[in-house]
């Protein structure tokens, strides 16, 4: 059961809560073409490829990206995050990528067309670190934080042509992804350096409410957005 589905121009990412993991139970199958199990410094990645046309070199780049960013994400945002992760190159998945529990699925067609977009891994792996339960808070926060972290720890954003979306007056903080991420970055610069860390913890621990913004910054989210709209420099 998909808990949160978001659209922004194109289908970007779905993230489902931990308890929905049963839905993903068939992650191993006879159709697996290769399975690499790699352990580095206490973190294990099971990398499964189900698409015979998919480049081996690209698989290795994705694995390398994972081992660069995941330890940083854990250290910064959730030291108790899963230490065993599965990543599946899955031709049956038609979005870009999706994460449920500790399983990431990536569409091979997307990566074949956008081979530099390695930080899809950074975004999806952050969903594992977030480990939010159902009803933890708005989906735009979940996706905004994942893209904030992609901006923070991404290894290949520039080559991928990926950056935080410049502000324009048609935007809203509920747009999610890069638009929300930029707003979060601005808050960390103007109000509270560790705002995103605190927001992430509140979301995971189930303590987030709309009052969170005011408690942390002295302003409501609408007040913050109004100020941001007037001077969105980062
Ligand atoms: Zn996402």
Image: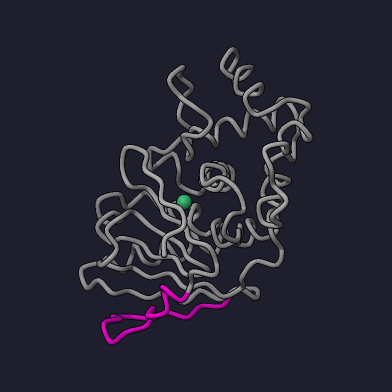
Q: Residue at x 57, y 59 (%)?
A: 134
Residue 133 covered by magenta stretch: no
Looking at the image, which residue sits at the far left? Answer: 53
Left-right relation of 89 to 156:
left
Q: Residue at x 46, y 57 (%)?
A: 3
Residue 105: quarter of image:
bottom left
Left-right relation of 48 to 99:
left
Residue 132 lies, in percent from the top left, at: 60, 58
**Quadrant (top left, top right, bottom left, bottom right) of the N terminus:** bottom left
Residue sitting nearer the eye, 160 or 191:
191
Residue 34 covered by magenta stretch: yes
Q: Please report the bounds of the magenta region as a residue range.
A: 22-39
Residue 77 lies, in percent from the top left, at: 68, 54
Looking at the image, which residue sits at the far bottom? Answer: 30
Q: Does 9 appear above or below 102?
A: above
Q: Residue at x 55, y 37 (%)?
A: 181
Q: Does 102 appear above or below 144?
A: below
Q: Residue at x 71, y 34 (%)?
A: 213
Q: Does 71 appear above or below 120?
A: below
Left-right relation of 220 to 8:
right
**Quadrant (top left, top right, bottom left, bottom right) of the C terminus:** top right
Residue 33 lies, in percent from the top left, at: 28, 80
Q: How many marks?
A: 0
Residue 103 lies, in percent from the top left, at: 47, 69
Residue sitting nearer the eye, 114 or 104:
104
């Amino acid at each position: 059961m998909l808990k949160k589905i978001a659209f922004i121009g194109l289908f970007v990412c779905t993230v489902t809560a931990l308890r929905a993991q049963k839905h993903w139970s068939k992650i191993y199958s006879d159709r697996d073409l290769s399975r690499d199990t790699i352990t580095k410094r206490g973190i294990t990645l099971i990398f499964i490829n189900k698409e015979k046309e998919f480049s081996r070199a690209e698989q290795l780049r994705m694995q390398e990206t994972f081992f660069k960013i995941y330890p940083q994400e854990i250290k910064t945002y959730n030291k108790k995050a899963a230490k065993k992760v599965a990543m599946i190159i899955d031709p049956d998945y038609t979005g870009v990528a999706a994460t449920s529990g500790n399983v990431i699925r990536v569409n091979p067609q997307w990566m074949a067309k956008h081979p530099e977009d390695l930080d899809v891994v950074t975004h999806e792996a952050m969903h594992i670190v977030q480990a939010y339960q159902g009803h933890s808070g708005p989906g735009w926060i979940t996706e905004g934080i994942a893209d904030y972290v992609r901006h923070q720890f991404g290894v290949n954003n520039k080559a991928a042509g990926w950056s935080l979306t410049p502000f324009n007056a048609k935007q809203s903080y509920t747009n999610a992804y890069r638009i929300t991420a930029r707003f979060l970055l601005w808050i960390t610069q103007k109000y509270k350096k560790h705002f995103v860390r605190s927001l992430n913890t509140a979301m995971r621990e189930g303590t987030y409410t709309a009052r969170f913004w005011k408690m942390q910054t002295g302003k409501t989210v609408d007040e913050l957005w109004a100020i941001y709209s007037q001077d969105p420099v980062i």
